[in-house]
Image (cartoon, rainbow, N blue to C red):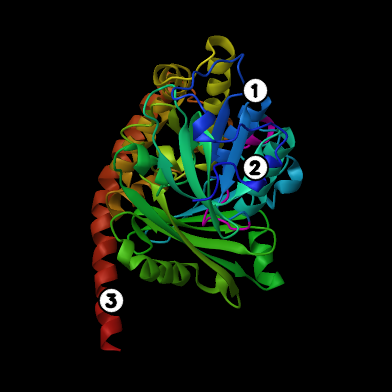
Amino acid sequence: MASITSPLLLAHKTKITTCNSSHRPRHLTITASARPLRAAVIGGGPAGASAAESLANANISTYLFERNPTGSKPCGGAIPLCMMEEFSLPHSLIDRHVSQFLLLSPSNLPSLFSRHLSADTHYIPMLRREVLDSFLRERAKEKGALVVPGLVTGIKMPRSEKEPYVIQYISEGSTQSIEADVIVGADGANSRVAREIGAGEYATAIAFQERIRLPPSAMSYYTDLAEMYLGSDVSPDFYAWVFPKCDHVAVGTGTVSSKPSIKSLQASLHARAGTKLAGGTVIRVEAHPIPEHPRPRRVIGRVALVGDAAGYVTKCSGEGIYFAAKSGRLCGEAIGKLWREEGKVTEAGLKREYLKKWDDEFSGMFRFLDLLHKVFYKDDAGKEALAEMCADAYVQKRTFECYLDKKMVVGHPWEEMKLAWRTVGSMVRNRVLGKEVERLRTLEANLSSLV
């Protein structure tokens, strides 16, 4: 194995103590006055980059590992408007200002789900993940974090709470390692950090996406319009999407229960979209796992999980970018606070300053969206009812109040009561309609097999 301090890390502005075991105390006591805390952030997406920026701001010696700096994730790329200001994102990152959102039911009935959006003040920013991720990593670097292009291959656990972790990684073709006093795992749904610390298993979905460059005439249709498709033909337990980007559209779907059928689901999406995608050229195909629920354990020792590694993707909407960045920032700030005020980072401290604050702010929202998913996504009848409900002006108002500003807004009691009755009525009607839709689809499939 190569030396613990690689030549790459020696170039960092913070001096790193070399790992000559013969000169190092057997039990290293870490205090705020002795030397800078060493933090390793594994994964350079929105979660990892935001964590690294917060750590660097706290004068913590920070190493941000990213295995594929030029890569991208199959992601719709929609973010809530509040994220622009909260994370000081320049508007130059935005590809499209979406003010028209079309929701298509399993029977392909359209519902314009955007009465409370406007091109000027209340829109959905659409961007590309490679653009956003690169910007956030560069900003963390400017704050003092060292970005390490490398693949983490293992973590050696400390023998006591006073000893550092040893992170093994491959960079520029050679195996290297560094020590870290605290680790932030931001390495996605298949997190190696989570496996190394025994964070527990969780279910994952698969997202499959094509980037399709359309002719100018076809692309003009998607100037400020995004589409979301519901139905078991495009996803039995999620939804499919066509989201506009700078010079192409992102066309994708996701599923938990039918992963082997993901390509046939994508083909059904093409059929549903029809001529709107005609003449397009596929410029990239992407697939990636996404988490279905938070992991059983998100903090173990001095290791904390954030973003997809922690399972912070909402049911029903599948949203994860904002929650990734938010969790990374909250975790980084928690570590900085513990080091500054207590002179040490402990599991109890991370659970108090990071996990409790996260759960207090967002666990209710996650539970609510999980409930909606269970009610409306279990079959096409439920999805038909969901599409019908989304045409309701009050539903749209409440949805975008919560989505754009990321706050669970308390609704008007009388309007909430009327909404409950409308929901029941919609579910009753569409349980009948759903059966008819299935009958017609079966008939269509049988006729097609005879042709």
Q: Residue at x 60, y 38 (%)?
A: 63
Residue 310, horizontal then vertical, whole percent: 41, 37
What span is colored magenta in the figure?
70-85
Q: Nearer the viewer, residue 161 or 406?
A: 161
Task: Tell which circle, 1 or 2, labels the residue nearer the N-terminal end.
Answer: 2
Q: CA distance from mark 3 to mark 1?
A: 61 Å
Q: Residue at x 44, y 45 (%)?
A: 318
Q: Nearer the viewer, residue 205 or 369?
A: 205
Residue 127, horizontal then vertical, whole percent: 64, 50
Q: CA distance from mark 3 to mark 2?
A: 61 Å
- Which residue is disc 2 drawn over? 9
* Type of the residue with mark 1: Ala
Task: Tell which circle, 3 or 2, labels the residue nearer the N-terminal end.
Answer: 2
Task: Tell which circle, 3 or 1, labels the residue nearer the N-terminal end.
Answer: 1
Picture layout, residue 120 above or below residue 204: above
* CB-based contact (under 8 Å), mark 3 and mark 1: no
Q: Quadrant of the C terminus?
A: bottom left
Picture layout, residue 145 above or below residue 438: above
- Which residue is disc 3 drawn over? 445
135 in the magenta segment? no
* Type of the residue with mark 2: Leu
Secondary structure type for disc 2: helix
Q: Residue at x 66, y 40 (%)?
A: 146
Q: CA distance from mark 1 to mark 2?
A: 19 Å
- Which residue is disc 1 drawn over? 58
Secondary structure type for disc 3: helix
- Count the marks: how many? 3
Number of the front mark, 1 or 2: 2
Q: Nearer the viewer, residue 223 or 389?
A: 223
Picture layout, residue 207 above or below residue 164: below
